[in-house]
C-alpha cells in the first residue's frame, strides 16, 4: 500500500512519515504540505528528519493523485471532509484520525464510505482500542451499582473538549450499560448541584503543558474503586496505529470501519 500523508510538516505528519518508513508492507507515496509552505518540493524524509526518501512534498492531493492508494488524515474536520470527498471521487482509501467532528460531519464522512473504504476512529492507538474492549467488559460485569467517571488530559493546544477518545469511552460504557450517552453525560460540575445521580457518566477535562494524552475511567462504589487507565507518551503510538489501519485497508470493500475492525476486537 502506498500511503499519502497530509500535513506532512506538522508534528503528527512527521511521525506518520517515520512510522510508514518503519512498517513492512507499506511505502510512502506522497507527502502533502500547505500550498504556501516553503517545504513544497522538499524531500519528505528530510522534513521528518530521517534522511532522503525520494518523495517530494506537494501542495495538494491533486498533485499526488497517481502516487498513493490510501490517505492518512489527522487535520481538521472541514479539511478532512474535503479530503474524504476527493478520495471517494478518485477511488482512494482513507484513514481518518481527526477529532472534533460533529454529528453532521460524521454523517457526511459516512456518505463517502459508500464509495470507498474508510477507517475512522477518535484514537488510533492500539492500546486505547484494547482499553475500549476492557471498558465494555467491565461495564457489563459491574452494572449500575458502580458510578462511572472519565478524566482526560491533553496538551494546551488541543481545541476540542472532551477529547474524542473520552467521548468514545463514554459511548462504549453507556452502550454496555444500556444507556444513551446524550441523556446521561455530565460535563464538569460546579456549584450546588446536589448529589450524583445513579446513572450519570461524568467527564472532567484537563488541558496543560505538553501532555500527549491520558485517559482514566473510574468505576466506583461503596468500598472500592476500579480504574482503567491509558497514558500515551508519544504521538508515535497514534502514527503506528494509523499506518497499521492503512495497511489493513488493502483489498477492503467500500465501507466505514474503525480500529476495532482493524484489530479484530469485535
Image: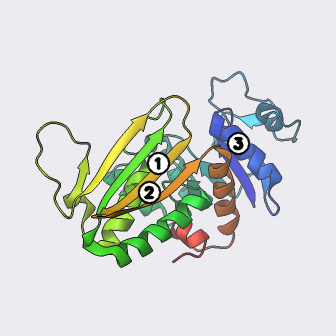
Pinpoint residue 13: horizontal percent, then vertical percent.
66, 40
Residue 191 visible? The answer is yes
Pinpoint residue 190: horizontal percent, then vertical percent.
19, 37
Q: Earlier in the sequence, mark 3 or mark 2?
A: 3
* Residue at the spot of label 3: 15
Residue at 25% x, 71% y is 145
Q: Nearer the viewer, mark 3 or mark 2?
A: 3
Spatial CA span between label 1 and label 3: 22 Å
Mark 1 and mark 3 in contact? Answer it, CB < 8 Å: no
* Residue at the spot of label 1: 81
Mark 3 and mark 2 in contact? Answer it, CB < 8 Å: no
Residue at the extreme front: 223
Residue 161 visible? The answer is no
In the displayed structure image, the side of residue 99 where residue 58 appears, left or right: right
Nearer to me, 259 or 223:
223
Residue at 71% x, 38% y is 14
- Give the SS element for disc 2: helix
Pinpoint residue 41: horizontal percent, then vertical percent.
78, 30
- Give the SS element for disc 1: helix
Q: Pointer 1: residues within 10 angstroms few (<14), some, or many (20+)?
A: many
Q: Earlier in the sequence, mark 1 or mark 3?
A: 3
Quadrant of residue 212 within the rendered picture: top right
Mark 2 and mark 1 in contact? Answer it, CB < 8 Å: yes
Nearer to me, 57 or 154:
154
Pinpoint residue 166: horizontal percent, then vertical percent.
41, 52
Q: Earlier in the sequence, mark 2 or mark 1?
A: 1
In the displayed structure image, the side of residue 25 where residue 263 appears, left or right: left
- Give the SS element for disc 3: helix
Q: Determine which of the numbered discs, if any, sits on residue 109 in the image.
A: 2
Identify the colour scheme used: rainbow
Nearer to me, 42 or 129:
129
Amino acid at each position: 500500500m502506498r500511503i499519502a500523508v497530509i500535513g506532512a510538516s506538522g508534528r503528527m505528519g512527521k511521525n506518520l512519515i517515520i512510522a510508514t518508513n518503519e512498517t513492512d508492507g507499506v511505502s510512502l507515496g506522497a507527502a502533502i504540505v500547505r500550498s504556501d509552505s516553503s517545504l513544497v518540493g522538499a524531500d519528505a524524509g528530510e522534513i521528518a528528519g530521517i534522511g532522503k526518501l525520494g518523495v517530494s512534498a506537494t501542495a495538494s492531493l491533486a498533485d499526488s493523485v497517481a502516487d498513493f492508494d490510501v490517505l492518512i488524515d489527522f487535520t481538521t474536520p472541514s479539511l478532512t471532509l474535503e479530503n474524504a470527498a476527493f478520495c471517494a471521487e478518485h477511488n482512494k482509501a482513507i484513514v481518518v484520525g481527526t477529532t472534533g467532528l460533529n454529528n453532521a460531519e460524521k454523517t457526511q464522512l459516512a456518505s463517502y464510505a459508500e464509495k470507498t473504504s474508510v477507517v475512522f476512529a477518535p484514537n488510533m492507538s492500539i492500546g486505547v482500542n484494547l482499553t475500549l474492549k476492557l471498558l465494555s467488559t467491565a461495564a457489563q460485569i459491574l452494572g449500575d451499582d458502580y458510578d462511572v467517571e472519565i478524566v482526560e488530559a491533553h496538551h494546551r493546544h488541543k481545541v476540542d473538549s472532551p477529547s474524542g477518545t473520552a467521548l468514545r469511552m463514554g459511548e462504549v460504557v453507556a452502550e454496555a450499560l444500556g444507556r444513551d450517552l446524550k441523556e446521561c453525560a455530565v460535563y464538569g460540575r460546579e456549584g450546588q448541584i446536589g448529589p450524583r445521580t445513579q446513572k450519570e457518566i461524568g467527564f472532567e477535562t484537563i488541558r496543560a503543558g505538553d501532555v500527549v494524552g491520558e485517559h482514566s475511567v473510574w468505576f466506583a462504589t461503596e468500598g472500592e474503586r476500579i480504574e482503567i487507565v491509558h497514558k500515551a507518551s508519544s504521538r508515535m503510538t497514534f502514527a503506528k496505529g494509523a499506518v497499521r489501519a492503512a495497511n489493513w485497508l488493502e483489498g477492503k470493500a467500500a465501507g466505514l470501519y474503525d480500529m476495532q475492525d482493524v484489530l479484530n476486537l469485535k
